Image: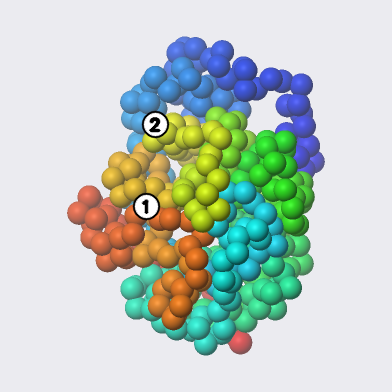
Amino acid sequence: MSFAEVMGAYADLDMAKAIHGFQRQDVMRALDKDRLGPDDLLALLSPAAGTMLEELARKATAVTLRHFGRAVQLFTPLYVSDFCTNSCVYCGFNAEQKNKRRQLSLDEVRVEAERIAATGLRQVLVLTGDAQAKAPPEYLEQVLAVLREFFPSLLLEVYALTQEEYARMITAGAEGLTIYQETYDPEQYARMHPSGPKQDYVFRLDTPERACRAGMRWVGIGALYGLGDWRMDAFWAALHARWLQDRYPGAEIGLSLPRMRPHAAGWQPEHPVSDRDLTQILLAQRLFLPRAAITLSTREAPGLRENLLPLGVTRLSAGVSTSVGGHGADQAGTPQFEVADDRSVGEITAMLRSKGYQPVFKDWQQLNPVTP
Ligand code: SF4
């Protein structure tokens, strides 16, 4: 059974309506459990739970300490190409934008890698737009070959690949990937993706599973909050993560909480997500998935990132640029979106230590790393 079929099993339920029917006692019942079911997750995402965030926060803090201690993994994105054939209405790289496009040469990748490595970071997330003719899997393999000279941990956030292509990326040195469904609402998904290969909702929904089947060690998923009803997107993203955890115990499944930020294409979210809403998403997902790594990116402001840390966040990006060439190669391109936290790796590290957290630069390395 695919995750699309899992979603199909709920098709007769008006979940968006049902979630408004939960009461305080339903939330309390969910908080009393160690392993929560889908109904409990809905209760924690309900308006009723929105009035009980302090109670949710107490338990989420304890759960996070029990499973992760005070360790926080640091990483940074490295944009290598902003060519894109999709028209995602919420993205500054979309094909309708007339920005000058850039793709790093392998020499430029090396320059960026040297700059990032000098900050002490050991985990890098490699990003591209979706233009396979410009940045095919062969290019990604070459980029990974350069980067693995510098970094023991390489993740991909690129267009959706086939299982065979993911296997190639693993051979080339990729440890994992991040891929967001953006919104789990198929109708809203169609409106947000009017043209390009990303229009295929089901192919994208099946992508994390293809990566797990290929043997990726780390698979991060999530929704882009602000595109659809945040309660439902948070529900489906968490259920998707649980489904992957249960089905692929050899893979570490993580969640991210990206929220819409200003960007060159200018589109405004139809479903704005407040700081309080984002906090509720984090708390509900942490309690439903006690072992899942949860990432909070520089889309969020420094104060909010620091306040949410104890409630379940285990990964932070640092020293971030969302432009191709943004780490130091000349002529950085157009940013994909504006970051809200532009602190350096040193500043984020100092902040974590001052709050009693341990910044983690590397938590895993292949026993038999591939050789060029
Ligand atoms: S979100 Fe990704 S696929 Fe969509 S326009 Fe932006 S870079 Fe392209």
**Residue 96 seen in this snapshot:** yes
1 and 2 marks in contact (CB < 8 Å): no
The location of residue 84, given as percent across then percent down, is 66, 64
Q: What's the amino acid at mark 1?
A: Ala
Residue 344: quarter of image? bottom left
Q: Quadrant of ligand 1?
A: bottom right
Label of residue 340 in the image: 1
Secondary element at image label 1? loop
> Which residue is at 51% across, 56% downward?
264
Q: Which residue is mark 2?
A: 276
The location of residue 350, given as percent across then percent down, is 23, 60
Q: Earlier along the polypeptide chain: callout 1 or callout 2?
A: 2
Q: What's the amino acid at mark 2?
A: Arg
Is 318 placed above or below 40 here? below
**Residue 156 seen in this snapshot:** no
Near-viewer residue (240 or 252): 240
323 lies left or right of 69: right
Is 171 placed above or below 68 here? below
Q: Is the residue at mark 1 in contact range of ligand 1, meaning its CB lies under 8 Å from it?
A: no
**Tag 1: Cα neighbours inside 10 Å, few (<14), some, or many (≥20)?**
some
